[in-house]
Image (tube, rainbow, N blue to C red):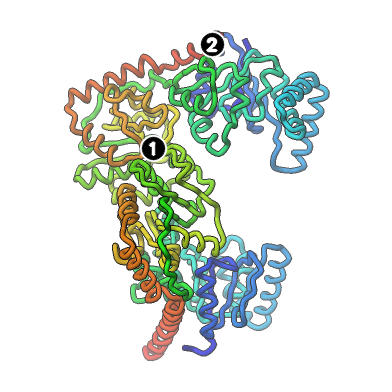
Amino acid sequence: MKIGLVLPSTPGYSETFFRNKILGLQQNGIKVILFVNDYKSDEYFLNCKVIKAPRLGGNKFKVVLNIFMQVLKMVLVSPRNSLKLFILNKKDKLSTTQNVKQVIANQFLLTEKLDWIHFGFGTMTLGRENVAQTIGAKMAVSFRGFDIGIYPLKHPNCYKSMFQKVNKIHVISDDLANLLYQEGLSEYKKIVKITPAIDTHFFLSEAKKENAILQFTTIARLHWKKGLENTLEALCLLNQQGIDFKYTIIGDGGEKERLIFAVKQLKLTEKVIFTGKLSSEKVKKQLEATDIYIQYSLQEGFCNAVLEAQAMGVLCIVSDAEGLSENVIDKVTGFVVPKQQPKLLFKKIKEVIDLDDAQKKELSLKAMERVQNEFTIEKQQQEFLNFYEEN
Amino acid sequence: MKDNLKIAIYSGEIPSTTFIERLILGLSDKGCKILLFGYVTKKIKYKEGVIIRGYADNRWYKMSQFLRYSVLLFLFRNTEKKKLDEYIAKEMKKKTFAKMKYYPVLWHKPHIFHLQWTKSVKDWIWVQDFGIKLVVSLRGTHITTTPLSDLKVSEEYKKYFPRIDGFHAVSEALKKEGEKYGADSSKIKVVYSGLSEADFVDKKRNQDKVFKIISVGRNHWIKGYSYALDSCKILKENQFEFEYTIIGASGAEELEFVKEKYKLSKEVIFTGNKSFNEVQESIKNADLLLLPSIEEGIANTVLEAMQLGTIVLTTNCGGMSEVIKNGKNGFIVPIRDPQMIAESIMNLASMDQKKSEEIIKEAFITIQNNHSEKKMITDMISLYNDVLNNAYQNSSQDKLGK
């Protein structure tokens, strides 16, 4: 079997999701080809051939040259597929200009003979709805948080055409599936849920030290989606009650100014530490020293960091944003609090602090067990095999 | 006042914001000679007494400006030119650009160089070496947030603030912020923003059942719009009928997301920027102006609403409590508290006609007394005079010392 994976760029070192998926498929004798938008990527990646999209922005001279090359390709390499794509697009009532643009821009996707073409993100299918049918492949799409949670807000009905053509859709949580139905997907059977997975051999709990003061941790990009301002507001209330703690935020991002201002305004300067991005080893170390892990996001596909924390036996308090309430089972493997309500988060943190040791132990064991059973890379790789093989 | 007081009002851009433009015109009406330097974004004609010595974003324009002033300075004030060149060589990265920007200021030598945006203080501290007095405005995020997250900026403030000849603070609260970086308290004068005079509008209460709320201001986290949306959710849960418009917030991903999640597409409207007159019209037509900010100097839109007869609900941030007295000329709630915003809105919507008229009247009087353009200009000129008199006293003391 031969699968083409369409991604923005070759997966970075920390993007374990696609790396693991590719490795798993290869181990089972499936050939994987990568199609990427990033023209700077290498020719090969994890033993996959990498085919790059032509650069159609920036230096005008280069763009003209690239378009010319694509037109040559269209005539000499894949004239039949190009014509086929043009006709299919025309059936969809695309304007001729748009149609020609699409045929030229998608040349790089037309050259390989594939069994499946799998788009790594929903937004990557836009303007490529007919590519799979053109090359005689089946079409698969993965949906994460942004492409169904946020993108359609500004682009209503953007997936309408794609929904009719896609063969299978992969989601990482039931909540994302619901969003897809809301957005107009009608065929339930097309959706397959495969949750993210983590390296459960690496994130294993080790004997915990007793902390002198409570340690809270969040791993997140510094972005409004992550609800860090709400978290700080909840911690401000905790501080006002005279409860001592340290809160570590691991991650970088554009909203640092907003958060630093909140820390000062909420009088938490002595309590909050921004570490920036950390290596997995350092993350593991921080999790080992953490009493409560908090992920109070406004929007979240699933969140691997919460899985990692649970695997390490750290008590987790999360918001009910999308996939989070599937990631943590409320009152069984951790706690789920309605999002955007700092007062409720504050109450929950207090409640968890006051749990007795036996209760804490039970929650943490349940969480570890569940992650070790259900969120392993091995399981995920098997699920992807089934994804392509079942019909 | 000194005859022919020459003042440079510098905001980097010509024309500048509404309030800075108002300051320029007001000062020139009082007989000051105003010099404007910086980047000309739009052609604008002022009355006599306001001289533009800026540059357009055009290579030839900049080149000719650079050459003209190079020659003038070389011929008539070469010692000073050399001194400034040395400074530029030592301190500046883009040397030619710096010369193009600085030479006209050195040539025209205003008595006072009034810098409107705090963050550029490092770029203009040199004017003091040439006998020009440097006055800096303390306003906006440049003083409230930037130095908190940007250590470099905070170091610069600590280094330069003690040397500045005079500060204009837009509120008492910002005066205190300035003092944190070593600004001499006696050199900071609070000058409130002023509005041009207007007649009191006896606004009749909207007969519509739907309560109209408005906010005005760019989409920035400091404006606290996400808290406003949280309170909209609470209003909706309480079956309170309202319509909330934010002028200047269209296209904000975070706000669009929250609006959608709270299912507020019917109640909440985001629009793009509007012209000054359109904004005034929208404020007039609203029942309430809401300022949900987490930090502000003194928000001009609040002052405008008070003048236009629209009731104000503001968070207690920055200098807002210097303007609004709760229940007297408007309403104040704590910052970051959507529950309180929602409750206040519901309470004030059911307020009786008489009480509402009293508040509107009181708000108008506040503006007349503390925020008239006349007062702003008089206060500003008195700040300039203090700066010049101080300088005179200091130099005579120096002489006595010798």
Q: Residue furthest front?
A: B207
Left or right: B195 as drawn, with respect to A331: right
Crowding near the residue tagged with mark 2, few <14, some 14–19, many ≥20 C-alpha atoms within 10 Å: few
The circle on residue A250 is 1
Q: Amino acid at mark 1?
A: Ile
- Same chain check for tags 1 and 2: yes
Residue A228 in percent (x, y) is at 37, 41
User: Which residue is at 58% across, 77% downward?
Assistant: B35
Placement of B197 over or under A72, stated as above or below: below
Q: Nearer the viewer, residue B76 or B380?
A: B380
Picture quadrant of residue A39: top right
**Label 1, label 2: how many angstroms apart (C-alpha)?**
34 Å
Q: Nearer the viewer, residue B206 or B230?
A: B206
Left or right: B205 as drawn, with respect to B123: left
Q: Nearer the viewer, residue A263 or B276?
A: B276
Give the SS element for disc 2.
helix
Picture quadrant of residue B353: bottom left
The circle on residue A27 is 2
User: Which residue is at 45% across, 45% downward?
Assistant: B267
Left or right: B73 as drawn, with respect to A383: right
Placement of B186 over or under A179, stated as above or below: below
Residue A88 in percent (x, y) is at 73, 22
Q: Amino acid at mark 2?
A: Gln
User: Which residue is at 49% across, 51% downward?
Assistant: B219
Q: Is any atom of residue A341 visible in this view?
A: yes
Of callouts 1 and 2, the N-terminal one: 2
Give the SS element for disc 1.
strand
Placement of B317 over or under A340, stated as above or below: below
Position of the C terminus of chain B, as image quadrant, is bottom left
